[in-house]
Amino acid sequence: MARWLLLPLILLVALVGLLAYVGSERVIQFELLASAPTGGQFISVQAAIVICAGIVLGIILLWSLLTWMWRLPNRMKKGMGRRRSEIGLDAVEQALLAVESGDGAGALKKAKKASELLNRPALTALISAKAAEMRGAHDDAHSHYTSLKDNPDTEAAGLRGLARLSETRGDHAASIEMATAAFAGSKSPSWAFDLLYNSQTALADWEGALDTLATAEKRKLLDKDEIRRRRAVLLAANANALDAKGRAVEALDQAKRAADLSPGFAPGVALAARLLSKDGQIKKAAQIIEKAWGRSPHPALSIAYRDVWQGETAKTVAKKINQLIKSNSGHRESKILAAEQAIAADDGVTALSALDGLLRDEDPSARLCALAAQAEKMLGNTVDAHTWQNRAVSAPIEADWSDLDPDGAAFNYTDADWQRLALSYGKSGTLIHPRYEAYKRRRAVGSVKEAVQSIDTPPNADDPGIDAKGTEKQDLADRLQNLLEGDPKA
């Protein structure tokens, strides 16, 4: 409209300027009839200018009025649309708040209202999908996410929603398909890696997960330490699977790589040591365990170390284990291993000395109580031994000790266990304990198995056993006397 009024307005301004220039004396003569004897009618120049300006101003006003009337219906329509948009945006806001607060039904209701009011199919489809997903209406959510996937502008959002929905429903194959499509691009988002990696490990596709991890490393989606831990778990899991299939050479290679990558990962180290021993590489098996013990001791490693040297003499084995203890002497497991060695040598005093700090500084576990009971029994302190046996029954269980299967190898993990390890140890370095969580049987501690089992047997009516209260003072007195006299059994 401004373009069309520009020329009349310029003309109006020119006429006003001309009016100021002309003044009040000049006139214009109009000859009504050229032969009229009376001559013509005269009008002043000022009047003529004012008349022209009035005509121009009238044209402007008339044009403005006509234009305003012409555009009035459209303006009314836009006003109603703006009001409709405001109501629709309010519905979107309320739907998002309902999603955040966990009100799936309310979110779905507001999302439907927003869909009716707004011409924003992508926005309303996304909110509707999230609301349906929260409510558990997976079919509706799948439909909305599919509509987003089919639109090039919203394809990534649709793929993510479908992949997450498939993972939630346990359809890992579909989740892999969607996440792979999103992960294929050079600038793939981190969520695509997470969903793809999680689904591959859930299906025990260790090699596929290794390939995905390699791509994530190239794109620097994870830091180096996490990449190293995740790869170590995947290699160990794959080695375990290959060994079960009889592919010993490949299994050994994968296990060694896992142990080299993360010496503190006890399951991988124990597996590598076992496969190396089976392959006759005794020294390499021992070196892997020694390296791991210096980094992060675990009871399964000490047992695996004994197994490595099982063909040697008792003296040689004891010497090797003592060297292992010295490599990390301040660690709790090294002190316990020293106590176990002393008990094996029938040296109760040294065993109690090794355990002394642990028994005083912490709430003794069943494992510590059992070792203390056997050491006291060796010294002839039956009351103390019985006391420690009783404490072993109700003492807390060590999670690491539960990793030792009494009927098989340590870390006897299933695919589900390896999958959890790929997440827990891979992300934070946390070792899981499936046997501990499932309350499964654990291996007996040292050679105290019979002593621990004896307390589970009800006392015979004719032989009620030791009266701890009645003999405690005498037992302690005898022990003190033996110590004063220098009796080595004290």
Image (cartoon, rainbow, N blue to C red):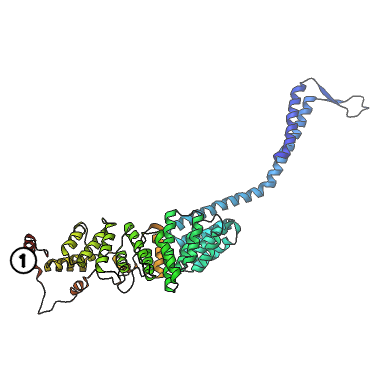
Measured along the vertical axis of the image, is residue 169 above or below residue 65?
A: below
Measured along the vertical axis of the image, is residue 78 above or below residue 1?
A: below
Count neighbours of disc 1 (C-alpha within 10 A) and say few if under 14, some if 14 to 19, many if 20 or more.
few
Task: Examine the rendering and report whether any part of residue 416 can be seen.
Answer: yes
Q: Residue at x 54, y 60 (%)?
A: 182
Q: Position of residue 4 (x, y in %)?
A: 73, 39
Front in this rendered view, residue 14 or 131: 131
Task: Examine the rendering and report whether any part of residue 167 can be seen.
Answer: no
Front in this rendered view, residue 487 or 398: 487
Q: Residue at x 12, y 69 (%)?
A: 382
User: Residue under circle 1?
Assistant: 474
Q: Position of residue 461 (x, y in %)?
A: 11, 79
Q: Residue at x 57, y 61 (%)?
A: 149
User: Residue 211 vs residue 310: left or right?
Assistant: right
For the residue labelled by badge 1, is the local secondary structure a helix, a strand or a loop? helix
User: Residue 215 vs residue 483: left or right?
Assistant: right
**Amino acid found under the numbered disc labelled 1:** Gln
User: Residue 134 vs residue 288: left or right?
Assistant: right
